[in-house]
Amino acid sequence: MQETGSTPADPVLGTPRLVLRPMILEDSVPMHVLRSDPEATRCYGQDPHADLERTRDWVRAALEGRRMGSSITWAITLRQDGQVIGECCLWNIDGDSKRAELGYELLRIHWKRGLMAEALTAVLDHGFDEMGLGRVEANPLSTNIASRKVLLGLGFRHEGTLRRRHFFRGEYHDEDCYGLLREEWATRSKI
């Protein structure tokens, strides 16, 4: 039996340059390129994956989150050739409060091209319009300037800083808290 984790209800999202499709176990190989990159993983305060099996375990956890209804993880692929270049997710989904957290990462060779903002626009449209979310949150490390720029460009508001919240490589790091409300997204997307 092939382990895909995909169900007929899993949404495929499209943008001009990208297709976001539900992540499958076979995405472990391209995701390992990203998750083993020390520069990329440093941005979110994690050590790089030392082997492919660790990345497979991470993908399996994402698939289990989808099965349990606590997350949706999309593989970000290039529309032109289907190459997996990253992932984005809505996780810590709280159906009672109609809230979720946004997560995302991209291969370094694709940074600074506007691709993540493009992908996250589709994810936010889906979250607010199809899932009925009222709020989406994101909590990057305070040192992750690129992530801050993406979030602010999408209309998120900085709501505070959690001081010394993340311990990584022998030192504490602050996390910034960002939030976006459905009404703010609806107003922004009409502009």
Image: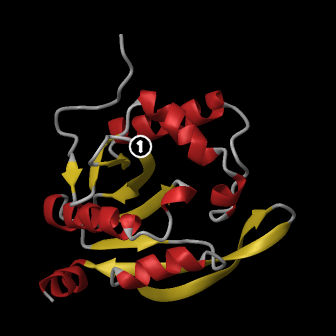
Nearer the observer, 74 or 183: 74
Q: Residues within 10 Å of mark 1 (few under 14, many from 20)?
A: many
Residue visible at 48% across and 71% down in the picture: 112
**Image quarter of the C terminus:** bottom left
Q: Residue furthest front?
A: 80
Nearer the observer, 116 or 54: 116
Which percent across, then down, holds residue 110? 48, 59
Which percent across, then down, holds residue 161? 60, 85
Residue visible at 35% across and 47% down in the picture: 77
Name the residue beneath numbered marker 1: 84
Q: Which residue lies furthest to the right in this view?
A: 170
Q: What residue type is labelled 1?
A: Val
32 left or right, relative to 152? right
Q: How many labels does the image show?
A: 1
Which percent across, then down, holds residue 96? 28, 61
Which percent across, then down, holds residue 160? 54, 87
128 left or right, relative to 173? left
* Quarter residue 68 falls in: top left
